[in-house]
Image (cartoon, rainbow, N blue to C red):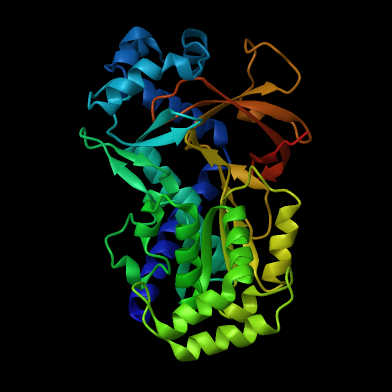
Amino acid sequence: MDERVIKTVNEARWIDGQNARNRLDDITYNPMRSQEEFVMRLMRENARTAYGRLFNFKSIHTLEDFRRCIPVTEYDDYSPYIDRIASGERNMLTAYLTEHLSPFHKNKMLPQTRWSVQVCYDYNFSQGFFVAANHGLLNDGMTLNLVDSHMEKLPSGVYVGKLLGRLLSKRELNNSQVYVIPLEVSNISDKDEALYLQALYSLKQDYISIAICDHYEKMLELLQYIEKHWLKLCEDIEKGNSYVKSDQERARAVREIMESHHVGTQIVGQLWPKLQCVMVNDVDRLSASFELLRTYCGPKVHFVFTGLGSPEGTFSTAINPDDPQTVLIPDSVFYEFKLKGTRSYNNLLTLDQLETGKSYELVVTTLSGLYRYKTFRTFLVVGRYHDTPTVIIDRG
């Protein structure tokens, strides 16, 4: 481990996150101004695309024009365009370069342009590091990466895979000096083998300061695997194998920890004393098992829920650690909302019309070429950050 590399990377992440937070602080005071500017920019810059010509974007000059002229859409409305994008055609849904396709519900895929990738990096990745660092939770240790970073490159040059996995390697650096688990582990199709390697590399390294996972269950699964297989893992660390070099001292330390450990009790602080923060990208699925993860981590480990997002867009971003409440991002997507319980999409609400304590189904217009797109996701408005709503997932 090269502490200079890690320090440089963490400083770069913090600076990127600070810049994103400064921008967020500016635009959340008057979110509708940013919302209107966002839509008008899309209409101007995408007027010559196939979709823009179909709906005559060049004739749209106000937010009211946009909502009157563009229909509410679903995935099937975009499927023919996405197929052509995957084959390398340009200017289908957007004039922006589409560089990534994210898997979405079975065999479906949604496009990600260069700008939507950047927004995800700014608000869901760098902003998470900023929140951690701003609360004293980011040490100069390695990153325990439990994110699916498997990527495939199509003949057209477009990448296919989980967007967060791609962000792990966004900067040009020696990943082995930053990440505990080699990114190539994500390419292993056998789940048991992949989990073994995650556990092996994780136990081998004691100087870990932060963990990143797309779903918190990944962290829980890792810890439960270590509980069950620690004898074998310690033996492999002690003797060394084709994956890790022999480290008898580390093997002895892990063995002492695990011999006194009781299943389902605090363990993270013993295995990785420097780890103070777990960044969780997907907060859609918090359940009772999350409390078990809290038990494993103990009171000194904090969680940063980086925001609500999906292949459809980056919707919200973290404000504080240990708080699933996140703020909607006024310059990330254009938001429209259908009040929960109503059927019609004819009278959608805008950001400034939301009421605290009510739930709404989200309709979005994005930087990747989705226009007034039904996400079928329902958010509960719980408060305000400046003049912009804060939300959590509605599970009712």
Percent across and percent down for residue 356 are 76, 35
**Above or below, comparing residue 331 to residue 78 in the picture:** below
Q: Which quadrant is the N terminus positioned in?
A: bottom left
Q: Is residue 53 left or right of residue 304?
A: left
Percent across and percent down for residue 146 are 49, 59
Percent across and percent down for residue 168 are 39, 56
**Above or below, comparing residue 141 to residue 215 in the picture:** below
Q: Tally the numbered discs.
A: 0
Depth check: give the residue in front, 115 or 377: 377
Q: Looking at the image, can residue 144 be seen? A: yes
Q: Which quadrant is the C terminus positioned in?
A: top right
Percent across and percent down for residue 352 are 64, 29
Q: Residue at x 76, y 19 (%)?
A: 341
Depth check: give the residue in front, 162 or 184: 184
Q: Looking at the image, can residue 139 be seen? A: no
Q: Quadrant of residue 298?
A: bottom right
**Above or below, comparing residue 171 to residue 162 in the picture:** below
Depth check: give the residue in front, 172 or 183: 183
Q: Is residue 267 left or right of residue 67?
A: right
Q: Quadrant of residue 228?
A: bottom right
Q: Residue at x 29, y 14 (%)?
A: 50
Q: Residue at x 31, y 24 (%)?
A: 45
Q: Residue at x 75, y 59 (%)?
A: 291
Q: Is residue 210 left or right of residue 388?
A: left
